Image: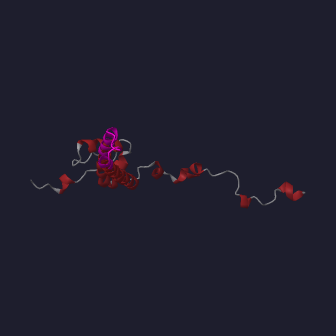
Amino acid sequence: MPRRSAAEMSLAIVPGHKPPPPENLSAAAKAAWQSVADKLSPERVSDVAFFLLGGLLAQHMVFADELAAEANKLLASNALADPEERKELRSVLKCHGDQSVRIADLATKLRLSSQSRYLAHSGASSKGISSHPAPWLDWELSEDEKAS
């Protein structure tokens, strides 16, 4: 295998353009990567964190889908009736749960949830800040009450 130069191995990040999925992913993982990347701005996809962790996220998404299909197949074959098949089902569901935890962890690290796109200047409306004064500040008498 010929040696590749550093320029060949590096990812050229062009502002405003989404890079293609990593070459080492399977076809299903590339499709998962693309489904996540399509929902993000080009700046987010070009981010170094997405470059490093996006491929892992896509692989875990594919693994979770495959394990879910296996679990559904076992459930359809009435795996709960047979103790041996129940053990296999439990093992598959545990593996699926592990993949789900990894997906959630990577999604959090990549800041993919809507909570991670919180903007500080729009926080007052989302926090439900009242236009009424705070209860500890409204104890002063109004001008009408002072006159009486």
Say if residue 18 shows up in the picture: no
Q: Residue at x 86, y 59 (%)?
A: 146
Most foreground residue, 25 or 39: 25
Most foreground residue, 130 or 104: 104
Q: Residue at x 35, y 45 (%)?
A: 42
144 on left or right of 77: right
Q: Residue at x 75, y 58 (%)?
A: 138
Answer above or below: position of 36 versus 109: above
Answer above or below: position of 117 versus 75: below
Query: Is the magenta region chiefly helix, strand or loop?
Result: helix
Residue lying furthest right: 148
Most foreground residue, 26 or 75: 75
Q: Is residue 31 magenta?
A: no
Tell me the quarter of the picture where residue 143 sits. Answer: bottom right
**Which quadrant is the C terminus positioned in?**
bottom right
60 on left or right of 136: left
The range drawn in magenta is 66-86
